[in-house]
Image: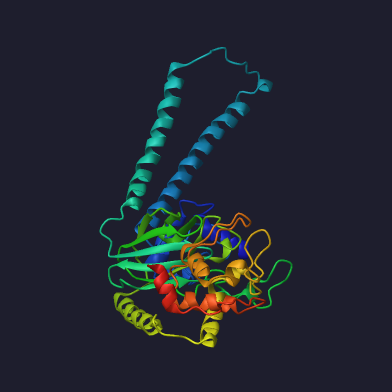
Amino acid sequence: MTHAKRLQSLMLGLTMTAASIPAWAAETAAGTYGAATGGTGGPVPGQMNLQPPATQIASQIYDLHTWMMVVCLVIFVAVFGVMFYSIFKHRKSVGHKPATFHESTAVEIAWTVVPFLIVIGMALPATRTVVGMKDTSNPDITIKATGMQWKWGYDYLAGDGQGISFLSNLKTPRAQVGAPGFAPTEARGDNYLMEVDNEVVVPVNKKIRIVTTANDVIHAWSIPAFGVKQDAIPGFVRDTWFKAEHTGTYRGYCSELCGKEHAFMPIVVKVVTDAEYKTWVDGKKKEMAALADDPTKTWTIDELKTRGEKVYTANCVVCHQATGKGVPNAFAPLDGSAVVNGPRADQIHVLLNGQKSGKYPAEMPAWKQLSDTDIAAVITYTRNSWSNKAAENIVQPAEVMAARK
């Protein structure tokens, strides 16, 4: 079931019939839109169709898919119907002899003109949809989505909510995932691998522009119900948009193969009413203000280690492991690392700017999105954990702040 859900979320659909459009329209008119997706805004068990569209672009994609399938079906039936009829009706056993003609101007004109008309009939509506997908002008809200191994970072750049930023991690406990060769120790929930700790929240019926980029490898921001899929490429800025017509929670995934944890970086967008969105914005800004630290504050080593362990668990443990041993031939160990046990300025530089290693294929990405205090805390934690005994065993937020300049 897990793999079925995964495939259905990443693919726009496998099979569709013309009768599905009226069925979906009836569901929507009856107010059963949420029930059509099992209340998850994502794939449901046994689903063979596209997810019910929540935007106009997704509806156009839905209709295009149906139209293409109908055209292909008609061509298939016509061509093979004529072929099988001719084989059966004009078979040698009933006395028919093969024709002796070599060419027919009328037939050659027909098999040139008819396919041309079919292509035009398919290309015109497809072009209209593609042009609409690329029109990101005049958005109500602009959000930057930064892909990173293996989570998403969001920054509200313009519109109501400007200034809000947060990281969005997989919320499904690792105990539900299990490990290679070992069964999970907890029962898997309905939204297994499709839930996050921080959802993207947007208002209904507002044009949302998503600006995508990445800080390590190529990722892709995708929500099938919105008809949206946009690559996030390091060093490049791409954009897409959506305008959700229904409130609810919609789920997607990074849909570019981005590394060993590719399956564990879902995307969740919660569409709410205007009043609910304003309440969320106010609450999120108060939360950010409460979490903001004075970078000039001097912390004790125990305070930094306690906080650093939480930062490490949330952001670093996937690659470097809880033991600090890393992953052989993939991710560098921190236990016994020359960088971790060396001058603290070098480790600060690595976290702020990233690092390429000739020994390990995986590149250490920059972590500038973390606060000065979080970077100072996680460095202090690694310098005082496992077998590490760094001479410079404590880093204060002020040092990180100075290194950013």
| Left or right of residue 53, residue 305 in this image | right
Find residue 125 and report its horizontal and vertical position in percent.
Answer: 36, 44
Q: Which image quarter holds the N terminus? A: bottom right
Judge by depth and name the residue closer to the eye, 125 or 388.
388
| Left or right of residue 280, residue 198 in this image | right
The residue lying at 62 percent from left, 27 percent from top is: 87
- Can the viewer see residue 52? no
Find residue 50 and report its horizontal and vertical position in percent.
Answer: 48, 57
**Residue at the limit of the structure toward the left, as seen here:** 138
Query: How many numbered marks appear?
Result: 0
**Residue at the limit of the structure toward the right, as seen here:** 181
Find residue 166 and report its horizontal and vertical position in percent.
Answer: 42, 73
Q: Compared to 32, does 216 lie above or below?
A: above
Q: How is the image coloured?
A: rainbow
The residue lying at 33 percent from left, 47 percent from top is: 131
Specify the quadrant of the image occupied by residue 316. bottom right
Judge by depth and name the residue closer to the eye, 192 or 47.
192
Judge by depth and name the residue closer to the eye, 300 or 196.
300
Q: Which image quarter holds the C terminus? A: bottom left
Specify the quadrant of the image occupied by residue 96. top right
| Left or right of residue 83, residue 246 in this image | left
Q: Compared to 371, does 79 lie above or below?
A: above
Find residue 44 and report its horizontal and vertical position in percent.
Answer: 54, 66
Q: Compared to 56, does 68 lie above or below?
A: above
